[in-house]
Image: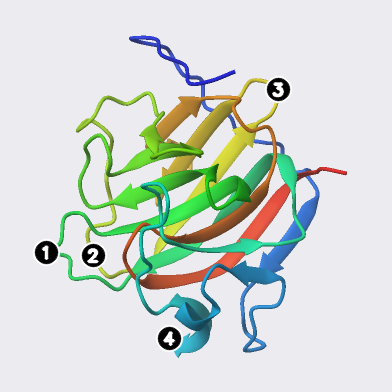
Amino acid sequence: MGILTLGFILFVGFAPAADLPLLFSSDFENGRADGWRPNVPGHWQVVDLDGSKVLALTAPGEQGMVRAPTSWAVAEKCDVGTFDFTGRLRSEVDPANLRRDLCVFFHFLDPTHFYYVHFSASSDDAHNIIGLVNGADRVKINLEPPGKSVFRLTDKNWHTFKVTYDAATGRIAAYLDDLAEPILTAVDRTFSHGLAGVGSFDDTGFFDDLSLRGTKQD
């Protein structure tokens, strides 16, 4: 099944039950990023910031075979279907750049097959979206029209995120700061499972307190 292309749909937000098994939790306080697989190891390191150790994406990536995010680190042993992925993120890019971004990845199968949430400082058909990369250039799949999604990555402060997926319905919801009301929603079943992770389309930033609950695939 592919992208849902209805002109309008009433989206009922999905929040997985709190009793979903905890698959991992990373605060990086041991100074290591155990269990994380980055696409370019030299672009990622654990650093001290704001009195804590955090995972830093220190350099932007380069575009590959398809137009898609260029930097990611995925939790390599957590292949999930239904999930609830939470954490904190902070952009390092000048707030004057309205296309600044940080991304959350899910159902990651390989570098050209995955979903991602693109948190940005502006909204259009490529920024502040839920994107699908399916062997070709990324496409926007969220239900909010271009330019109409709520964007909040407008500063260099820490922001709390949550991304959820319901395997039974294909419902996707992404939250930033307000964890009760999603800013991006979609319904898609192209990929039913995969890895979760963090990164960016072409910027740098920081991540911390990452936690994944979900149903692990065999």
Asked if residue 136 lies left or right of residue 150, the reply is right
Q: Indicate the secondary structure of the residue bearing disc 3.
A: loop
Q: Residues within 10 Å of mark 2 (few under 14, many from 20)?
A: some
Q: CA distance from mark 3 to mark 2?
A: 36 Å
Label total for image:
4
Is 70 in front, or is 156?
A: 70
Residue assigned mark 4:
49
Where is residue 215? Give x, y as percent.
79, 42
Q: Indicate the secondary structure of the residue bearing disc 2.
A: loop
Residue 96: image tag: 1
The image's colouring method is: rainbow
Q: Indicate the secondary structure of the residue bearing disc 4.
A: strand
Residue assigned mark 3:
168
> Which residue in the rendered view is the most extreme toward the right?
218
Q: Earlier in the sequence, mark 2 or mark 1?
A: 1
| Amino acid at dot 1 | Ala
Q: Earlier in the sequence, mark 4 or mark 3?
A: 4
In this rendering, the label closer to the viewer, 4 or 3: 3
Q: Earlier in the sequence, mark 4 or mark 2?
A: 4
| Amino acid at dot 2 | Asp
Q: Residues within 10 Å of mark 1 (few under 14, many from 20)?
A: few
Q: Earlier in the sequence, mark 1 or mark 4?
A: 4
Residue assigned mark 2:
155
Q: Earlier in the sequence, mark 1 or mark 3?
A: 1
Q: Indicate the secondary structure of the residue bearing disc 1.
A: loop
> Residue at the spot x=54%, y=53% of the render?
111
> Residue at the spot x=21%, y=54% of the render?
99
